Image (cartoon, rainbow, N blue to C red):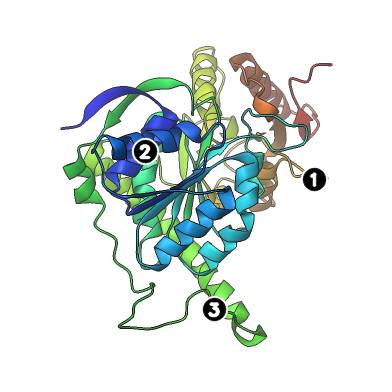
Amino acid sequence: MSKKAFLSANEAAAYGVKLSRPHVVSAYPITPQTTLVEKIADFLANGEADFKYMMVESEHSAMASALGASMMGARTFTASSSQGLLYMCEMLSYVSGSRFPIVMVDANRSVATPWNIFGDQRDAMAMRDSGWIMLYVESGQEALDTVIQAYKIAEDPEVMTPVMINIDGFTLTHTYDMVEIPEQEEADSFLPPYSTTNKMDMKDPKTLCMSVGPDFHTEGRFLQQKAFEAAKRKIVSVNDEYAKLTGRSYGGMIEEYRCDDAEAVLVAVGSVAGTVRVAVDEMREAGKKVGLIKLRSFRPFPKEYFESIRDKFKAVGVIDRSISFGFDGTVFSEVKSAMYGSGAKMANYIVGLGGRDIPKHQIETMFSKLLGMASGKNEAEVQFLGMRWE
C-alpha cells in the first residue's frame, strides 16, 4: 500500500528514481537540482537502495559516465540544470543518436547572461533538437510518477530514446506538498528490469556510437524520427497503464481542463498550469467560457492534437517561459505551426523569465485579452507581460 509524505518536487523525483531501481546514478551538483541527487545519495547511504553512485567533476562528465554505463546495459540516471545542461549539450546527441534510454531530470532554470539562479524554461528549450524526449510536470506528484513512466517509455524496444523530465526550478524543486509514494512492489509490477541488446558484450561484439558517411546518415535520422512517432503512442499508453495501477493520470501528451465549451483557452507548460486551473475555475464561476490545455510532452510534440483543434476555439493563447530571440516564444512557434490555417485568434504571453512570479491576476488578464480577441478586438500577437515599466 502506498504512503504519503510531505516532499519537495526534487525529493519526489528522487523517490521516483529509487523506485525505478537504477544500476548507476551519476551526479554533479548545480542549483536548483542539487537536493535531488543529495536525496538519492541519502537512499544509498541509509541502505534503502542499491546502485553505483558516481560523483563526477562536471556536468559533461555526468552525462558521459551515464552514457558509458548505459553502453554496458545498465539502467542509468542523472540530473542537471541551466548552464550545466548547456555544458552537457555535446553528450546529449551522442546518447540520443546511439539510442541509449537514459533518464534525466532538468531543474529548469534561466541561463546566462544576465546571471540568475531562478527558474524559467530557456535551458531545456534550447535543447529541443537534441533528440531527447522532453516531458514537463506540474507538481511533485507528477515528477515522481513521470520518472517511473519515463523509464518504461525510454526502454521500450520501439523507442529506445532518452527522456528529459523538466521540473520548474524553485517553484517546484524547493516547494513542498503531499506526495503519494508507491510501494516498491507496485513500481516493480509496472516497470520490469531493463534488458537490451544495444550494449557492449564480449560474447556478441559490436560497434556502438559508430561513425557513418553520407550514404547512411539520413537513414539513422529517419530511424530516430520513427522512434519519436512511436513515443507518441507509448507516452499515452504508459500513462493509461500507470493510471490503472495508481489512479493518477496526466493525460499522456496533453491534458484538457474545462475545454469542452470554451471560447478561449491557454496552453501552459509546467507548474504554471496549476495557477491557470485556479483562474479557470474562478472565471467559470463568473460565466466566462475559458479552459486550459496543459502541454506535457514538448518532444515529441503533439502536432496531431493541435491540428484537431484548429476550429474548436475562438481564441488560443500560449504561455511561454522562454523565447526564441528574433522570433516568438518557443512553445508558441510550435503551436502556431501545428494550427496553421486555424480561424482562431492566437496570442503569445511571455512571462516568468528569470523566476519572476506569474500571479493569478496575470493569468486572468491573459484570458480577458483572449476573450476580447474572440469578440473582435485586436491585440498584439506576442506580448511580454509583467515588465517593471508597465
Badge 1 amino acid: Phe
Residue at numbered disc 1: 327
User: Marks 2 and 1, how far apart in space?
Assistant: 42 Å
Answer with mark 2 or mark 3, whichever residue precedes in sequence: 2
Q: Residue 277: x percent and y percent?
A: 49, 24
State which mark lies toward you, 2 or 3.
2
At 59% from the left and 32% from the top, the residue drawn is 266
Answer with mark 2 or mark 1, whichever residue precedes in sequence: 2
Q: Quadrant of the C terminus?
A: top right
**Residue at the extreme top of the image, as rendered:** 286
Answer with mark 3 or mark 1, whichever residue precedes in sequence: 3
At 79% from the left and 29% from the top, the residue drawn is 379
Residue at numbered disc 3: 210
Q: Quadrant of the N terminus?
A: top left
Badge 2 amino acid: Ala
* Neighbourhood count class around disc 1 (C-alpha, 10 Å): few under 14, some 14–19, many 20 upward: few
Q: Residue 369: x percent and y percent?
A: 71, 23
